[in-house]
């Protein structure tokens, strides 16, 4: 099994759902992990699961919808390590279900703050260190959502995530800091709901593929976690 020994990963929104699967999956590959939730007490269970894998684990908290929350997260990260090698921008929110023309602009902004602007803020803060060390893997969570205009703020924010990631990858070409976007599939999490197609565990091992890429591997690409679900 390919390991990530001596690496540190930050997984936003790893207090539950897909983020928890990813954080524990990384820890099983011997990667040190920083788990995150809006409140520190939300992160305890994931942290315990990761610690059981024998790696170093830190927990940070903060609301990605506010500047103060992002600063608190970055302060916590700096206390844990000066070396974030792998960044999963996983946390995201959906808007409330309404006809597309009835969704107030405030709600569009709230969704974009968490799903896009916070991702950009974390990349802005952590990419310079990756460039200095000549190694980085950025994985931005996207969605395959289609034809669901009642969730347009969410789905349009994810389209923006895709474009942002491709632009970031172009900027980072030749640096060994790789930026890719990951579609986890439709999963039974709090966000995906009970009628979703797949169990949360099926996001592995595919979700780890963009973190395990060889040096100067593909960047600016879409990875679909469900394509790998039968891989050991
Ligand atoms: N589930 C699916 O079917 C599906 C499909 C396609 C794409 N995705 C994407 O996969 C990612 C994870 O989804 P999920 O289903 O695991 O979601 P989830 O079960 O709703 O979990 C959301 C995570 O994000 C955190 N979070 C929510 N609002 C936040 C905020 N304002 N600031 C900081 N953290 C916040 C939550 O922390 P707390 O526990 O502290 O609230 C939690 O850890 C998202 O990017 C989502 O868009 C999911």
Image: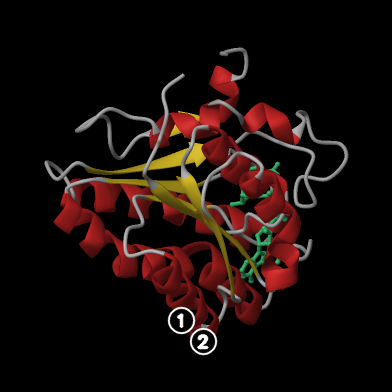
Q: With 210 as the anchor, is 156 left or right in this view?
A: right
- Against 19, residue 218 (above or below) is above
Q: Residue at x 27, y 60 (%)?
A: 127
| Residue beneath disc 1 | 71
| Residue beneath disc 2 | 68
Mark 2–mark 1 distance (CA, rounded to whole Å): 5 Å
**Quadrant in the rendering for residue 217:** top left
Q: With 167 as the anchor, is 42 left or right in this view?
A: right
- Against 163, residue 118 (above or below) is below
Residue 4, position as x, y percentages in the image = 40, 35
Residue 98, position as x, y percentages in the image = 78, 64
Could one spot residue 87 in this view of the protein?
no
Towards the viewer: 147 or 5: 5
* Element type at mark 2: helix
The type of colouring in the image is secondary structure
Mark 2 touches mark 1? (CB < 8 Å): yes
Residue that lies at the very extreme toward the right in this rendered image: 194
Characterize the local packing of mark 1: few (<14), some (14-19) or many (20 or more) Cα atoms within 10 angstroms: some
Residue 139, position as x, y percentages in the image = 42, 45
Q: Is mark 1 within 8 Å of ligand 1?
A: no
Towards the viewer: 205 or 54: 54
Q: Quadrant of the C terminus?
A: top right
Residue that lies at the very extreme toward the front in this rendered image: 54
Could one spot residue 105 in this view of the protein?
yes
Q: Residue at x 35, y 35 (%)?
A: 221
Characterize the local packing of mark 2: few (<14), some (14-19) or many (20 or more) Cα atoms within 10 angstroms: few
* Element type at mark 1: helix
**Quadrant in the rendering for residue 115:** bottom right
Residue 175, position as x, y percentages in the image = 14, 45
Q: Residue at x 50, y 32 (%)?
A: 29
Ligand 1 falls in quadrant: bottom right
């Amino acid at each position: 099994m390919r390991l990530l020994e001596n690496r540190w990963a930050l997984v936003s929104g790893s207090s539950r759902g897909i983020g928890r699967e990813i954080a524990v999956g990384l820890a099983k590959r011997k990667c040190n992990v920083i788990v995150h939730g809006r409140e520190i007490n939300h992160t305890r269970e994931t942290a315990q699961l990761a610690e059981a894998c024998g790696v170093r684990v830190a927990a940070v908290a903060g609301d990605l919808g506010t500047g103060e929350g992002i600063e608190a997260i970055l302060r916590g990260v700096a206390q844990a390590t000066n070396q974030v090698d792998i960044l999963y921008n996983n946390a995201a929110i959906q808007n409330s279900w309404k006809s597309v023309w009835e969704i107030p602009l405030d709600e569009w902004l709230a969704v974009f703050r968490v799903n896009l602007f916070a991702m950009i803020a974390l990349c802005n803060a952590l990419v310079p260190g990756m460039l200095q060390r000549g190694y980085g893997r950025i994985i931005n969570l996207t969605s395959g959502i289609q034809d669901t205009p009642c969730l347009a703020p969410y789905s349009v924010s994810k389209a923006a995530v895709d474009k942002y990631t491709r632009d970031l990858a172009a900027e980072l070409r030749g640096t060994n800091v790789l930026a890719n976007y990951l579609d986890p599939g439709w999963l039974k999490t709090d966000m995906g709901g009970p009628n979703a197609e797949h169990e949360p565990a099926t996001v592995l091992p595919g979700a780890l593929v963009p973190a395990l890429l060889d040096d100067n591997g593909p960047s600016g690409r879409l990875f679909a976690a469900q394509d790998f679900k039968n891989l050991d």
